Amino acid sequence: MITTVQQHLLDMQQRIPGARGTFSWLLSGITLATKMTEAKIRRAGLSDLIGAAGATNVQGEVQQKLDVYANQALLHCLGVRDSVAMLVSEENEEPVTFDRSPDAGEYVIVFDPLDGSSNIDVNVNVGTIFSIYRRAGARDTSHPAHVLQRGCCQVAAGYVVYGPSTILVYTTGQGVFGFTLDPAIGAYVLSHDNIRMPERGSIYSVNEANSDDFPRRYQTYLARLRSGDLGRKYTSRYVGSLVADFHRTVLKGGVFLYPPTKGYPQGKLRLLYEANPLAFIAEQAQGLAVDGTKRILDIEPHDIHQRTPFIIGSREEVEVFMNSP
Ligand code: P6P
């Protein structure tokens, strides 16, 4: 007997305070957009979708053709749902708002439509990351306060990793669940029930090329992992695609870090649509996520595209970092 993500959501929804049918309808907009993106990724090399779209996004990064497609798919599939008050995308400088009656749009959705997309040309995993909040209450649906909420206010968060198989992982605060897309029926089917991150791992994941740039604290911590000081041998794995590196960390344990560097003094990864959703999932899977001094989920955002240092993974490895001088 299979459980699709829609069925799972309906069950979950009974346990989300105040959630009505609109919530699962919202998630179905996200799953539809990711299936559209997945179909394009699978054939990218055959349909002139490889390579740059010729523009740069708000981050100053060259937009890939599939970035644009994935972004348009999410904006369309979510924009037609009247429970959406505002959308924030890595690809859009400003939030996208809808002139609905202030009482209609209940939810705000934040997403990175296709993270790691520069890897597509070399057939490496990429991902979609999303986060859902309730509107903060201000009646003006275009008010930035709706989206500048701490990560602990998330109603739901998830990601899709497009790899050898396409897997959707999400949480609504009642645990973490994974669904594998079955191409035969076009449905996400429950494949990872109640994911728990191992208490400790033996993998660390960081871009070693930046090591000389890292603050001393990070260099000392990484040297401890390499030296066996924590009582076990670590190996290094770094895909360079956040969703792939995080998905491995959730399942196998260990730690992923993107420390401050000269090029990114606040870290490279974005708080709202990368760190917060993954931090919600990590904590729900019994892991931890910090910015070096505090929980990611406690950071008060001031800008929709702000960046943060990011250390996420098994409880033991993250606690060792947090207790380091
Ligand atoms: P670096 C991809 O561009 C991305 O945003 C994340 O997916 C990934 O974790 C990170 O950047 C990789 O950055 O500087 O190590 O290439």
Image (cartoon, grey):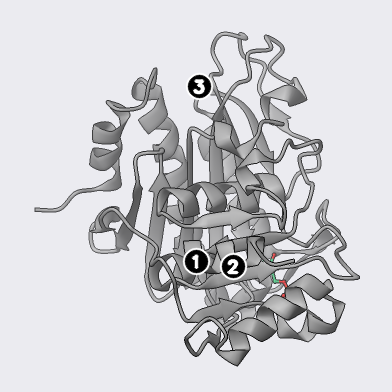
Q: Mark 1 points at which residue?
A: 316
Which labelled disc corresponds to residue 218?
Answer: none
Secondary structure, mark 3, is loop
Crowding around mark 2 (Cα neighbors within 10 Å: few <14, some 14 to 19, many 20+) is few
Residue 269 image point, x, y percent? 72, 59
Cα distance between the residues tagged 2 and 3: 42 Å
Crowding around mark 1 (Cα neighbors within 10 Å: few <14, some 14 to 19, many 20+) is some
The image quarter containing residue 290 is: bottom right
Q: Can residue 293 be seen in this view?
A: yes
Kindly identify the amino acid type of the residue bearing the numbered disc 1.
Glu
Kindly identify the amino acid type of the residue bearing the numbered disc 3.
Ser
Q: Which residue corresponds to the image point at 57% horizontal and 36% vertical from the top-left?
A: 152
Examine the rendered structure and indicate whether residue 240 appears above or below residue 101: below
Q: Mark 2 points at which residue?
A: 320
Kindly identify the amino acid type of the residue bearing the numbered disc 2.
Val
Residue 44 image point, x, y percent? 55, 72
Secondary structure, mark 1, is helix
Residue 257 image point, x, y percent? 65, 69
Nearest to the eye among marks 2 and 3: give it.
Answer: 2
- The foreground one among 277 and 100 is 277
Examine the rendered structure and indicate whether residue 132 appears above or below residue 212: above
- The foreground one among 314 and 220 is 220
Which of the marked residues, 2 or 3, is nearer the chain's N terminus? 3
